[in-house]
Amino acid sequence: MADLRVDIGNLRLKNPVLTASGTFGYGLEYTDFMDLSRIGGVFVKGTTFFPREGNDYPRMVETSSGMLNAVGLQNKGVEYFISDIYPQIKDIDTCMMVNVSGSTVEDYVKCAEKIDLLDKIPAIELNISCPNIKQGGMAFGTNCVSAAEVVRKVRKVYHKTLIVKLSPNVTDITEIARAVEAEGADSVSLINTLMGMAINVEKRRPILSTITGGLSGPCVKPVALRMVYQTYKAIKIPIIGLGGISNWKDAVEFILAGATAIQIGTYNFVDPAVSVKIVDGIEDYLNCSGFDSVKELIGNLV
């Protein structure tokens, strides 16, 4: 049987299949549909230092081969996560990781400090790329200087695996990747959603309350693949690829393009058990193709 284990910095994953923040709640919501211990890890929903109400409704709309969202990082804050959620997820037999966001560098730092103290959370994903909040978020991820600053300051207080989530809404994503790598990121995840909008022609108004939102789903996959491939050639730290993955073939494409692991996002809404199906599909592909380890696939384009 092929070995599915991969490493992200010092973090050992039992397989390369992870679930993306914002599409999987805290993981607990999916336990009726799948065994969480079957997958490599879960990125729980975006967590901020202060509670956030999120954006006004409507904030989600279906599009051709995808969806737009402008939820705006609605969550009850890191203290709620520590007191109410962490006790429920800390003993789940997979890597439970937290997506951290903020409106200021100080918010990122304070949130990361809190989570650093939680023994059973081995990694955070620093979200410097959210397009759905008015302050912070994507503003940090579209500029090398600001991206480097937030990573540098979080790295000083966070001592476990630090993954930085990158925005595709930039001219050259490899520049941002190099900047965060230089400041101590252990890994980068890409891509976050693309900026998009939808219009109601009867009302002649944008559908989303925020006018624009983040586009995800199968429609973004070619863009995401291209960016993973470019970034793989530009940096030395591991890449976690995401964007439109809906089956094992999609996942293998990302790994061949250079991703060490992948995240399943929007398709969790279509098939809540898709992640375990992708684990099985990758394993079958490796066994049928004569590979001993999934690591042999990483960046292995002919």
Image (tube, helix red, strand yellow):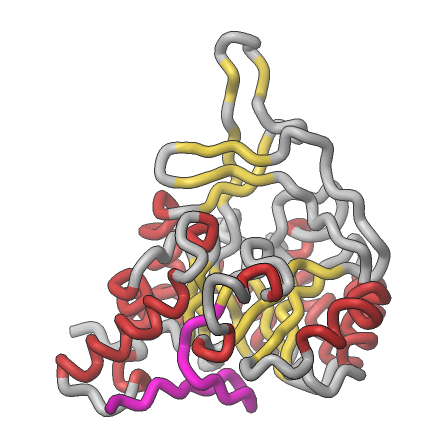
Residue furthest toward the front?
Answer: 32
Instruction: Please give the range of residues in magenta.
Output: 1-18
Residue 57 x, y percent position in the rendering: 68, 30
Relative depth, front residue between 244 and 162: 244
Residue 263 x, y percent position in the rendering: 45, 65
Q: Residue at x 54, y 62 (%)?
A: 30
Q: Count the numbered circles shown.
A: 0
Q: Is residue 18 above or below residue 67?
A: below
Relative depth, front residue between 35 and 126: 35
- On-image quarter of the C terminus: bottom left
Q: Residue at x 41, y 77 (%)?
A: 16
Q: Residue at x 41, y 47 (%)?
A: 217
Q: Is residue 17 magenta?
A: yes
Can residue 171 be seen? yes
Q: Is residue 266 left or right of residue 287?
A: right
**Which image quadrant for residue 27?**
bottom right
Q: Is residue 219 left or right of residue 8?
A: left
Residue 225 x, y percent position in the rendering: 34, 59
